[in-house]
Image (cartoon, rainbow, N blue to C red):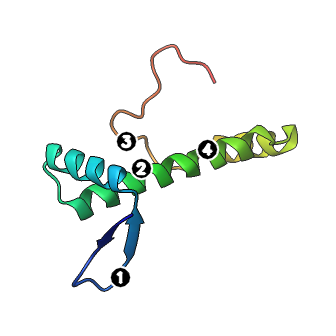
Amino acid sequence: METIQKENSSTERVVRLDAALCAEIELYSEKAGESLDSFISRASAELIHRHKADEWYERSRHSTPEGRAKAIELLSRPSGNPPLPGDELPDGHRP
Protein backbone atom coordinates (compact mmCIF):
# COMPACT_ATOMS: atom_id res chain seq x y z
CA MET A 1 0.00 0.00 0.00
CA GLU A 2 1.16 3.50 -0.83
CA THR A 3 0.62 6.28 1.70
CA ILE A 4 -0.38 9.78 0.71
CA GLN A 5 0.07 12.31 3.48
CA LYS A 6 -0.97 15.92 3.27
CA GLU A 7 1.37 18.16 5.23
CA ASN A 8 1.10 21.74 6.47
CA SER A 9 -2.66 21.67 6.67
CA SER A 10 -5.16 22.28 9.42
CA THR A 11 -6.77 18.92 8.57
CA GLU A 12 -3.97 16.46 8.00
CA ARG A 13 -4.98 12.99 6.84
CA VAL A 14 -3.05 9.91 5.88
CA VAL A 15 -4.65 7.85 3.12
CA ARG A 16 -3.40 4.37 2.27
CA LEU A 17 -3.91 3.33 -1.33
CA ASP A 18 -3.03 0.33 -3.41
CA ALA A 19 0.22 1.06 -5.29
CA ALA A 20 -1.42 0.60 -8.71
CA LEU A 21 -4.30 2.93 -7.80
CA CYS A 22 -1.87 5.50 -6.43
CA ALA A 23 0.11 5.42 -9.68
CA GLU A 24 -3.08 5.93 -11.72
CA ILE A 25 -4.19 8.82 -9.51
CA GLU A 26 -0.80 10.48 -9.93
CA LEU A 27 -0.94 9.94 -13.71
CA TYR A 28 -4.40 11.41 -14.10
CA SER A 29 -3.74 14.33 -11.77
CA GLU A 30 -0.70 15.20 -13.90
CA LYS A 31 -2.76 14.90 -17.10
CA ALA A 32 -5.38 17.21 -15.58
CA GLY A 33 -2.66 19.65 -14.55
CA GLU A 34 -3.78 19.44 -10.93
CA SER A 35 -1.93 18.78 -7.75
CA LEU A 36 -2.49 15.38 -6.19
CA ASP A 37 -4.40 16.99 -3.30
CA SER A 38 -6.63 18.97 -5.64
CA PHE A 39 -7.33 15.97 -7.86
CA ILE A 40 -8.23 13.70 -4.93
CA SER A 41 -10.39 16.41 -3.33
CA ARG A 42 -12.30 17.04 -6.56
CA ALA A 43 -12.77 13.33 -7.30
CA SER A 44 -13.96 12.72 -3.74
CA ALA A 45 -16.39 15.64 -3.92
CA GLU A 46 -17.83 14.33 -7.20
CA LEU A 47 -18.30 10.86 -5.73
CA ILE A 48 -19.97 12.25 -2.60
CA HIS A 49 -22.26 14.39 -4.77
CA ARG A 50 -23.24 11.28 -6.77
CA HIS A 51 -23.98 9.34 -3.57
CA LYS A 52 -26.10 12.19 -2.21
CA ALA A 53 -28.06 12.32 -5.47
CA ASP A 54 -28.58 8.55 -5.33
CA GLU A 55 -29.83 8.84 -1.74
CA TRP A 56 -32.22 11.64 -2.75
CA TYR A 57 -33.57 9.60 -5.67
CA GLU A 58 -34.05 6.61 -3.38
CA ARG A 59 -35.96 8.71 -0.84
CA SER A 60 -38.11 10.32 -3.53
CA ARG A 61 -39.07 6.91 -4.94
CA HIS A 62 -40.82 6.22 -1.66
CA SER A 63 -42.75 9.47 -1.52
CA THR A 64 -46.48 9.33 -0.95
CA PRO A 65 -49.19 10.94 -3.07
CA GLU A 66 -50.00 13.19 -0.10
CA GLY A 67 -46.35 14.25 0.19
CA ARG A 68 -46.12 14.99 -3.53
CA ALA A 69 -49.38 16.99 -3.39
CA LYS A 70 -48.02 19.04 -0.47
CA ALA A 71 -44.78 19.71 -2.36
CA ILE A 72 -46.68 20.80 -5.49
CA GLU A 73 -48.89 23.06 -3.36
CA LEU A 74 -45.83 24.67 -1.75
CA LEU A 75 -44.05 25.12 -5.07
CA SER A 76 -47.21 26.60 -6.67
CA ARG A 77 -47.58 29.40 -4.14
CA PRO A 78 -46.97 32.82 -5.64
CA SER A 79 -44.01 34.58 -4.05
CA GLY A 80 -45.05 38.08 -5.01
CA ASN A 81 -41.65 38.59 -6.65
CA PRO A 82 -41.44 39.34 -10.35
CA PRO A 83 -39.72 36.73 -12.49
CA LEU A 84 -36.02 37.20 -13.07
CA PRO A 85 -34.86 37.56 -16.67
CA GLY A 86 -35.19 34.12 -18.28
CA ASP A 87 -37.77 32.91 -15.75
CA GLU A 88 -40.80 34.03 -17.73
CA LEU A 89 -43.22 31.37 -18.93
CA PRO A 90 -43.33 30.78 -22.67
CA ASP A 91 -46.13 32.39 -24.70
CA GLY A 92 -49.26 30.26 -24.67
CA HIS A 93 -48.35 28.42 -21.46
CA ARG A 94 -51.33 27.42 -19.35
CA PRO A 95 -50.91 26.37 -15.70
Q: Does residue 53 appear left or right of residue 19 in this picture?
A: right
Residue position marked by numbered label 4 in the rendering: 54
Which quarter of the rendering shows the C terminus? top right
* Residue located at (26% from left, 83% from top): 9
Q: Secondary structure at mark 3?
A: loop
Residue flagged by tag 2: what amino acid is it? Glu
The location of residue 77, given as percent across then percent down, is 65, 45
Residue position marked by numbered label 3 in the rendering: 84
Q: Does residue 35 appear left or right of residue 43 in this picture?
A: left
* Residue located at (45% from left, 20% from top): 90
The location of residue 47, given as percent across then percent down, is 46, 50
16 to 13, vertically: above or below: above
Q: Earlier in the sequence, mark 2 or mark 3?
A: 2
Could one spot residue 77 in this view of the protein? no
Residue flagged by tag 4: what amino acid is it? Asp
Residue flagged by tag 1: what amino acid is it? Thr
Q: Earlier in the sequence, mark 2 or mark 1?
A: 1
The location of residue 71, given as percent across then percent down, is 72, 45
Q: Are marks 1 and 4 in contact (CB under 8 Å)?
A: no
Question: Distance from label 2 to label 1 (Cα)?
Answer: 20 Å
Question: Distance from label 2 to label 3 (Cα)?
Answer: 30 Å
Residue position marked by numbered label 1 in the rendering: 11
Q: Secondary structure at mark 1?
A: loop
User: For the residues carrying marks 2 and 3, which lies nearer the camera in this image?
Assistant: 2
Residue flagged by tag 3: what amino acid is it? Leu
92 to 67, vertically: above or below: above
